[in-house]
Image (tube, rainbow, N blue to C red):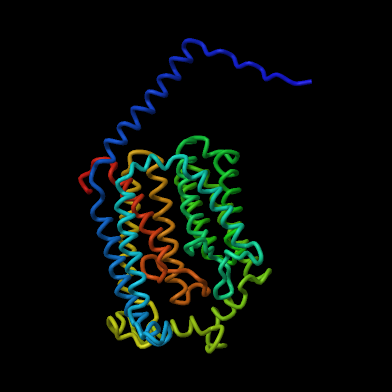
């Protein structure tokens, strides 16, 4: 016996008029957005990003040429090996950034859900044992090679920010309730960040959690849930590091890198030696004795970029744009903080790269595309004398 679906109640004349008015308002907003998208980008932010990328290439050349000359394809002795490869991706990434900046960011609405599904599938493929397309390096499986090699966690970061921005911007007052403002987003964060942590890639999981939490906070969740989440996060990290033993050796040799400076504590001990021998201002470009990627002045440029990013977020025309900028800027800020913390010994050693500086072509391209989204949002900022 088949069941027939109950017929929907026909709309009244007033309901039809209200529906037509909502559709008309949406069309008018999209048309207004298309016109606003033709405005100028935030030149200050664009120049800061370009400056960071240019300095990053110079520092990468200074830090990598000895290893490239002696270790990478010794028969050729090409000291520019890493610099040339990174420069190619820098040019391509810049083109992508400028292209993305011309798009109307409103078109990203709805793309986040599809990106979440894609990133979860990729993250599952990474952790499947003996997967032929998964790539393992230095004891961690974080990459897939499908024609090109990439980290699914990078896609996951973009997916979380894009989906959260769209979804949170639509809920408004509902964000203060646990059912609508906390539960669905916490579930997504736990699943995605959990898959990244299993690789293992704890720093990547922290980046995802940090960006997601910042967007929920800006979206208007109750401060009680913020405190609860912060306490839970600290507890989870403590259990992972000291109870389960996740990367426990890194914690041990973070506390005392000199206990095994030739092996487990090598990276941190050499970093501290480099910082100590160079002093506050370093030895000068190209004069580093150990070629460790550290130069304090460049972090100031990151601070300017991060501050400018939040300034753009405060002057956007809608919640969707604000949340997009907050998500990408917070991700950049947390990643810089983690990298500096690791290099200076403030945090345990982990595989966290410095945006725009560390070697990695696909990561650089994705970072520049994210900056392109911020520039796209900046085209539609509210008029301001400070701009």
Picture quadrant where residue 26 is located = top left
The furthest residue to the left = 385
Whether 224 is drawn above or below 73: the answer is: above
Q: Quadrant of residue 74?
A: bottom left
- Closer-to-camera residue (348/123): 123
User: Which residue is at a point 36% across and 80% down the rendered structure image?
Assistant: 63
| Residue at the far right in the pictured view | 1
Q: Quadrant of residue 130?
A: bottom right
- The image shows residue 141, relative to residue 69, as above or below, that is above
Give coordinates of residue 21: x percent, y percent: 40, 20
Task: Judge by depth and name the residue closer to the eye, 3 or 244.
Answer: 3
Taking the spot 61% from the left edge, 53% from the top edge, the residue there is 191
Tell me where residue 23 appears, x and y as whole percent. Answer: 41, 24
| Quadrant in which the N terminus is drawn | top right
> Residue 263, percent across and down?
55, 86
Q: Residue at x 67, y 20 (%)?
A: 5
Report the front residue among 38 and 219: 38
- Residue 274, percent from left and from top: 39, 84
Q: How many marks?
A: 0
Left or right of 180 in this view: 172: left
Name above or below for residue 228 compared with residue 345: above
> Can you say whether 136 is above or below 167 in the image?
below
């Amino acid at each position: 016996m088949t069941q027939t679906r109950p017929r929907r109640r026909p709309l009244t004349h007033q309901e039809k008029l209200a529906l037509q008015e909502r559709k008309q308002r949406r069309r008018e907003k999209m048309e207004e957005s298309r016109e606003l998208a033709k405005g100028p980008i935030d030149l200050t932010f664009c120049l800061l990003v370009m400056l960071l990328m240019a300095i990053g290439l110079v520092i990468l050349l200074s830090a990598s040429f000895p290893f490239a000359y002696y270790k990478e394809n010794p028969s050729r002795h090409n000291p520019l090996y890493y610099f040339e490869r990174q420069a190619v991706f820098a040019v391509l990434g810049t083109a992508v950034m400028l292209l993305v900046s011309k798009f109307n960011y409103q078109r990203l609405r709805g793309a986040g859900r599809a990106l979440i599904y894609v990133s979860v599938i990729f993250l599952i493929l990474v952790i499947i044992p003996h997967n032929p397309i998964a790539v393992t390096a230095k004891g961690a499986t974080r990459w897939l090679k499908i024609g090109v090699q990439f980290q699914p966690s990078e896609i996951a970061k973009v997916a979380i920010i894009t989906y959260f921005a769209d979804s949170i911007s639509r809920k408004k007052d509902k964000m203060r309730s646990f059912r609508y403002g906390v539960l669905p987003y916490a579930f997504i964060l736990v699943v995605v960040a959990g898959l990244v942590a299993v690789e293992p890639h704890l720093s990547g999981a922290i980046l995802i959690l940090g960006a997601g939490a910042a967007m929920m906070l800006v979206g208007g969740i109750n401060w009680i849930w913020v405190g609860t989440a912060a306490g839970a996060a600290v507890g989870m990290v403590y259990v992972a590091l000291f109870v389960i033993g996740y990367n426990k050796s890194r914690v041990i040799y973070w506390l005392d890198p000199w206990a095994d400076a030739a092996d487990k504590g090598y990276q941190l001990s050499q970093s501290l030696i480099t910082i100590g021998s160079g002093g506050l201002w370093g030895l000068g470009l190209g004069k580093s004795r150990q070629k460790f990627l550290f130069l304090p002045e460049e972090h100031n440029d990151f601070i300017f970029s991060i501050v400018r990013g939040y300034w753009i977020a405060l002057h956007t025309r809608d919640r969707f744009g604000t949340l997009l900028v907050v998500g990408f800027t917070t991700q950049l800020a947390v990643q810089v903080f983690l990298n500096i913390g690791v290099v200076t010994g403030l945090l345990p050693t982990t595989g966290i790269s410095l945006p725009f500086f560390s070697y990695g072509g696909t990561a650089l391209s994705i970072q520049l595309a994210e900056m392109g989204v911020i520039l796209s949002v900046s085209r539609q900022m509210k008029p301001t004398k400070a701009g």
